[in-house]
Image (cartoon, rainbow, N blue to C red):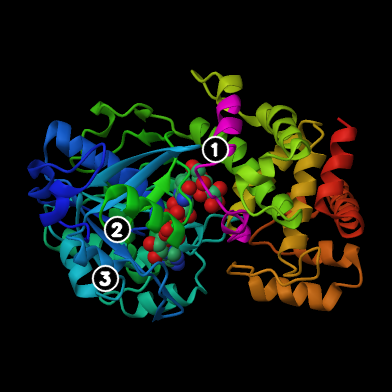
Amino acid sequence: MKLNRVNLEHVTASSLPNQKNLNAKVGIVHLGFGAFHRAHQALITDVAMKEHGGDWKIVGVNNWRAAGKPESETGVEQEFSVQDNLYTVAVGQDDRVDLEVIGAVEEVLFSNQVEKILGYMTDGNVKIVSLTITEKGYCHLPSTGHLDINNTLIQHDLQHIDQPHSAIGFLVSAIKTRKEKGIAPFTPLTCDNLPENGHVLKRVVLDFAQRLDPELASWIKENIHFPCSMVDRIVPQTTQDDIHKISKQLGAQDDCCVSTEPFLQWVIEDKFNNERPAWENTSIANIMLTDDVIPFENMKLRLLNGTHSSIAYLGYLAGYQTVSETMADQDFSTFIRYLMDKEISPSVNVKGIDLEAYKDQLITRYQNTALQHRTWQIAMDGSQKLPQRFLQTIEYGFANDLNVSGLVLAVAAWMKYVSGVDEQAKAIDVRDPLKATFDDIWRTHGDSISDVVSAFLSLDSVFSTELAENSVFKAQLVDALCQLTAHGAKQSVQQFIQTI
Ligand code: NAI
Ligand code: CS2
């Protein structure tokens, strides 16, 4: 039996959509309709409509192009229509799993259905265009935050703004049309793991618009807010095993389900250009509007994502497949808590949060065996993630005479990981926009660890000039990479915690 509207009354779940949701009109377009959005913003919006009404159904855009051709990512788009756009969120804690069936989705489109997407984005009823397009989707240079003008999708869109391929192109095309037609602007709401994500989005949109039409760029700068937001819920890529287990518990086949944890948080800058759902007034906790999101972003991107990426690279190299498996190794859990307490916390300055309790909760979240969160998945796109997860904290450490050698070990593990060869000399399936560059660095300089480190530090899209020219940082990186190469990740972590 397939999950769909007819069979909805026969399924087993702790919450189901109601007619208010199913019959609401579209109010949101979401670019990057991936696992996270489905377990976070779409679920929260579903609850907001159930509890407060409103026309906030979501049109999702997925399956993003790469280098101008459709790139099948998750392949769920076609499945959604078969399921009447219903799907299940499985909220798991160790051996307990609760199922919530979500009814907030109107339809899911491929990113090459351009006319249909722009039709929704230029409809006055659409008041929010939100994004979870991964860090690389912003087509920016992580070290500066500005638009990467050489990006192939950007190059295409500047010449064909009515047929955009990039998320940035879609945004500017729709903003331009709404302005020309006198339709009030939507709020572009980024929900990606980027520091000052709203400012990054505004900067790349303005960089793009300036090249397309300087008058439009000036108008956008004056008339459109790009709120920042901090988002948090651990949502691993859905596996076939997830689909089997969730469908069995549900009592219907759901090929679009996602699995996640009980915890979620959303801190949103209260700067909207138009109406929005009453997200913060739902029965879901940890959702707040504020004037200043940045302290919350720093806390989350450095304490959670910084240790997540440390687990990803060192854990994977040590032979651990998942976060919970890595954290079951006492040496690793000691190392991770040390990073949180001694190397990261000093750079976190957020009011109203009990940081010790927050860190305790993070450790518990990482140990949740209900989630098979793969170290390989988190290790993806490191060139886009390192600045906000490791490097800005390391810069703070050096500027304040702090010992950050644990984070330096994690950076060295990233360099080792992207060599594409693990400690058993087996190939690693490295996913990163700069993979070809990494291959070239290791092929050219692999005989000299010092030259490898120098070549990585010369990547100005990843490393700031300040860090690249820091001789102490470079020396520590060389030592750490030599240590990893000679003794492996597991022993390197063991030896590290002997020194603390
Ligand atoms: P996913 O792989 O399920 O979905 C990624 C989405 O991004 C897909 O819709 C894909 O089509 C789109 N995309 C990929 N490359 C793109 C590009 N170049 N331009 C435009 N769109 C592109 O990943 P998931 O789990 O949904 O995560 C997406 C983002 O959400 C993450 O990168 C992160 O910024 C944020 N996030 C994820 C969390 C998680 O635990 N999964 C938690 C907190 C934030
Ligand atoms: C993870 C994040 O894949 C990754 O890079 O570190 O998606 C992480 O699961 C979320 O930020 C948690 O909120």
**Amino acid type at image mark 2:** Asp
Please state which of residues 427 and 176 is positioned toward the viewer in this rendering.
427
Residue at image position (58%, 61%) is 381
- In this figure, which residue is indicated by the disc labeled 3? 78
Answer few, some or many: residues within 10 Å of disc 2's Cα (few below 14, many 20 plus, some between 14 and 19). Answer: many
Q: CA distance from mark 2 to mark 1?
A: 23 Å
Residue 228 appears left or right of 345: left
Instruction: Describe the element under mark 2 as helix, strand or loop.
Output: loop
Q: Quadrant of residue 380?
A: bottom right
* Residue 485 location (% of width, % of height): 88, 60
Residue 82 appears left or right of 465: left
Q: Which residues are magenta?
A: 359-383
- In this figure, which residue is indicated by the disc labeled 1? 368
Please state which of residues 87 and 28 is positioned toward the viewer in this rendering.
87
Q: Quadrant of the N terminus?
A: bottom left
Numbered badge on residue 285: none
Q: CA distance from mark 3 to mark 2?
A: 13 Å
- In this figure, which residue is indicated by the disc labeled 2? 254
**Amino acid type at image mark 1:** Asn
